[in-house]
Amino acid sequence: MNSASFICEPMRDKLVTSIPGVTPIYGQRLAAQGFEKASALLGKYLVLSQDEGPFVDWLKIICGASTDDAKIICLNLRQWCHNFLGPCIETPVPWHLVHHFD
């Protein structure tokens, strides 16, 4: 799924691999740790206060994500939150940056 589709659709029961940046390998590793659904990973992102640093570090440890992939995952979750939960304290990510990662 590309970024534009992911950030514009409700989460529902989507698999974690529907989040742009989550490869099949990362998805398997996340599922083995109880993060099979995109909503579970969103929950972890929210528990970490939508803070990119700790979330990226956690992804690198839990599923072996590269820094770039972890940042793409974070970027998409941040934009999804902005679209569906409302803006957070940080400035929303400009659309051209989200589109760049497709």
Image (spheres, rainbow, N blue to C red):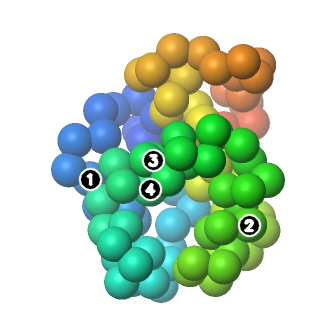
Residue 47 x %, y %: 53, 45
Q: Which residue is mark 3?
A: 42
The image quadrant that residue 40 belongs to is bottom left
The residue depicted at 42 percent of the width and 22 percent of the height is: 84
Q: Is residue 23 above or below residue 15?
A: below
Left or right relative to 14: residue 91: right
Q: Secondary structure at mark 2?
A: helix
Whether residue 50 appears in this view of the structure is yes
Q: Is residue 40 above or below residue 90?
A: below
- What is the three-letter code of the residue carrying label 2? Asp
- What is the three-letter code of the residue carrying label 1? Lys
Question: Depth-wise, is mark 4 or mark 1 nearer the camera?
Answer: 4
Mark 4 residue crowding within 10 angstroms, few (<14) / some (14–19) / many (20+): many
- What is the three-letter code of the residue carrying label 3? Leu
Q: Which residue is mark 4?
A: 41
The residue depicted at 57 percent of the width and 62 percent of the height is: 21
Q: Nearer the viewer, residue 65 or 98?
A: 65
Mark 3 residue crowding within 10 angstroms, few (<14) / some (14–19) / many (20+): many
Q: Which residue is mark 1?
A: 14
- In contact (CB < 8 Å): disc 4 and disc 1: no
Q: CA distance from mark 1 to mark 2?
A: 23 Å
- In contact (CB < 8 Å): disc 3 and disc 4: yes
Q: Nearer the viewer, residue 97 or 67?
A: 67
Residue 34 x %, y %: 34, 72
Q: CA distance from mark 3 to mark 4?
A: 4 Å
Q: CA distance from mark 4 to mark 2?
A: 14 Å
Residue 102 x %, y %: 60, 50
Mark 4 or 1, nearer chain start: 1
- In contact (CB < 8 Å): disc 3 and disc 2: no
Q: Which residue is mark 2?
A: 57
Q: CA distance from mark 3 to mark 1?
A: 11 Å
